[in-house]
Image: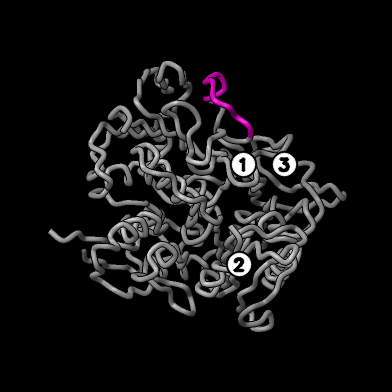
């Protein structure tokens, strides 16, 4: 699983960090997304997928390993 | 799994997310999505923020690009609305007369903006809900349309500056009726574009229902500091003008000249089409704690009233749309229910970012836990009877999220 975030799109809602705290964090100042782990272990796949769905700005892209 | 055929009525964030999560979890059945507007799915929070100010071109509010929509392998019925449901016979009728049968129906038709009693059809008077509403209003506020539909971020923000400069040369008098989240955000956007803004609110402070009295007063101060004329405790009693609005009359007898009036007086669930459906309707489609309204019928998002620990509630927030959509997709697929999440909304006004997790009571006591009011950056919790009911961030999004752990669910 490979993750990319687009901080330009991000509106700082923090939904990703709420949903998958081991993978996403927020910038201290404006709350925009900070990617902690761009290839997290598969046990987090469900959380990461939920985070991508919950992101209000579509700033998270998940590529599944083939 | 139920019959391998899901019909989703409404393609905002809630309806689209149900479809996406179903597919992601391996649903291979037929998926049909009915959208009343001709636009592909778009997000609402940016409409009164980035789209209205001109910082984003309108198409940037789209929720998913073409390739991701195509990947859903769904049938799209756009520019069509559902006009009737027979839940017993599993039938939905559309406004073009088509009759659709379904295995499972997801109701995601959202809300319709409320109009004021006696609100006339008068040029310059509008409500605000859709992308078209946002595009229309920003044009009235002097935001030019980008020449190129694919304008990038840099171009857009540059354009926003140009537009703000242009707007200043043609400042208009904008009256906003109702200082809820939407009214406050529109006031901030219009002020930022150089217009003269009056914000009329029947309650004592802006956003009282969402923020309580103390924080609502802080929002009042914020708007006044930026030059907004805030009129709390009054309503609009009349709209003056013949061809076009010229002024509004307030309940205290004042007349306020206006070039534009935006009515943001709340919204009502879009349930007219369900009147004879057999579903239970009471300020929204009544559902159990998993969003089930009847056999093979679910409701999600703004239109839905779900059971919760202390009765039932209907939330008009973006986060709720996503969370309920995930819960309904899980229910359709026969997965175990998820715990009820803590409500969350955010608002951007001027340069202030406001986050609220939980529910702030009208008379809640606020306790600052990080930063300070004087710094204009803080985290606070609201307390009632010694219980933390909400975590609040004022220019502190991350701190608010971390403080959420203290909130009783």
Where does the image place residue B117, in percent across and percent down from the top left?
73, 36
Q: Which circle's residue, 1 or 2, is located before the other in the chain?
A: 1
Residue named by callout 2: B391
Residue named by callout 1: B312
Q: Is any atom of residue B123 visible in this view?
A: no
Where does the image place residue B274, in percent across and percent down from the top left?
53, 25
The chain ID associated with circle 3 is: B
The chain ID associated with circle 1 is: B
Instruction: Identify whether B23 is placed above or below B107.
Output: below
Q: Residues within 10 Å of mark 1 (few under 14, many from 20)?
A: some
Q: Residue at x 56, y 48 (%)?
A: B316
Magenta region, main secondary structure: loop
Where does the image place residue B30, in percent across and percent down from the top left?
26, 31
Mark pair 3, 2: CA separation: 45 Å
Of B291 and B20, nearer the camera is: B291
Residue B183 among magenta residues: no
Magenta residues (range): B274-282
Residue extending furthest toward the right: B253
Do tags 3 and 2 sit on the same chain?
yes
Q: Would you say the residues marked 3 and 1 are in contact, meaning their CB atoms lie under 8 Å apart? A: no
Which-is-in-front pick, marks 3 and 1? 1
B371 vs B50, left or right, is: right
Residue B276 among magenta residues: yes
B373 vs A13, left or right, is: right
Mark pair 3, 1: CA separation: 43 Å
Q: Residues within 10 Å of mark 2 (few under 14, many from 20)?
A: many
Mark pair 1, 2: CA separation: 22 Å
Residue named by callout 3: B241
Q: Which mark is residue B332?
A: none
């Amino acid at each position: 699983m490979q993750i990319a975030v687009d901080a330009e799109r991000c509106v700082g809602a923090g939904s990703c960090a709420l949903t998958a705290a081991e993978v996403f964090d927020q910038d201290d100042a404006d709350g925009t997304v900070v990617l902690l782990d761009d290839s997290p272990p598969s046990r987090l796949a469900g959380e990461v997928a939920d985070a991508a769905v919950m992101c209000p700005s579509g700033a998270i892209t998940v590529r599944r390993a083939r | 799994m139920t019959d391998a055929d899901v019909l989703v009525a409404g393609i905002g964030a809630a309806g689209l997310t149900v479809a996406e999560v179903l597919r992601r979890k391996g649903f291979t059945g037929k998926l049909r999505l009915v959208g009343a507007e001709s636009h592909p799915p778009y997000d609402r929070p940016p409409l009164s923020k980035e789209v209205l100010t001109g910082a984003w071109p309108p198409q940037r509010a789209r929720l998913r690009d073409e390739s991701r929509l195509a990947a859903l392998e769904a049938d799209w019925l756009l520019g069509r609305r559902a006009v009737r449901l027979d839940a017993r016979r599993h039938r939905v009728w559309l406004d073009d007369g088509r009759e659709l049968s379904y295995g499972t129906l997801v109701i995601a038709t959202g809300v319709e903006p409320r109009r004021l009693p006696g609100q006339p059809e008068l040029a310059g008077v509008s409500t605000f809900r859709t992308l078209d509403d946002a595009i229309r209003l920003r044009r009235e506020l002097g935001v030019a349309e980008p020449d190129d539909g694919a304008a990038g971020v840099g171009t857009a923000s540059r354009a926003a500056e140009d537009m703000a400069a242009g707007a200043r040369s043609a400042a208009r008098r904008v009256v906003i009726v109702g200082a809820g989240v939407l009214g406050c955000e529109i006031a901030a956007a219009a002020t930022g574009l150089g217009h003269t803004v009056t914000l009329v609110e029947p309650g004592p402070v802006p956003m009282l229902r969402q923020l309580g009295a103390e924080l609502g007063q802080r929002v009042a101060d914020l708007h006044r500091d930026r030059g907004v004329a805030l009129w709390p405790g009054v309503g609009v009693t009349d709209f003056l003008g013949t061809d076009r609005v010229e002024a509004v009359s307030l309940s205290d007898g004042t007349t306020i000249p206006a070039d534009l009036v935006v009515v943001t007086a709340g919204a009502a669930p879009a349930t007219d089409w369900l009147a004879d459906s057999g579903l239970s309707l009471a300020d929204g489609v009544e559902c159990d704690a998993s969003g089930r309204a009847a056999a093979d019928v679910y409701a999600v998002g703004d239109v839905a009233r779900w059971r919760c620990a202390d009765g039932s509630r209907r939330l008009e927030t973006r986060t709720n749309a996503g969370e309920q959509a995930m819960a309904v997709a899980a229910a359709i697929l026969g997965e175990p229910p998820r715990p009820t999440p803590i409500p969350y909304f955010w608002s951007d006004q001027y340069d202030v970012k406001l986050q609220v997790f939980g529910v702030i009571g009208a008379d809640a006591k606020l306790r600052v836990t990080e930063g300070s009011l004087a710094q204009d950056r803080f985290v606070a919790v609201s307390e009632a009877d010694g219980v933390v009911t909400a975590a609040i961030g004022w220019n502190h999004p991350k701190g608010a999220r971390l403080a959420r752990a203290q909130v009783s669910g």
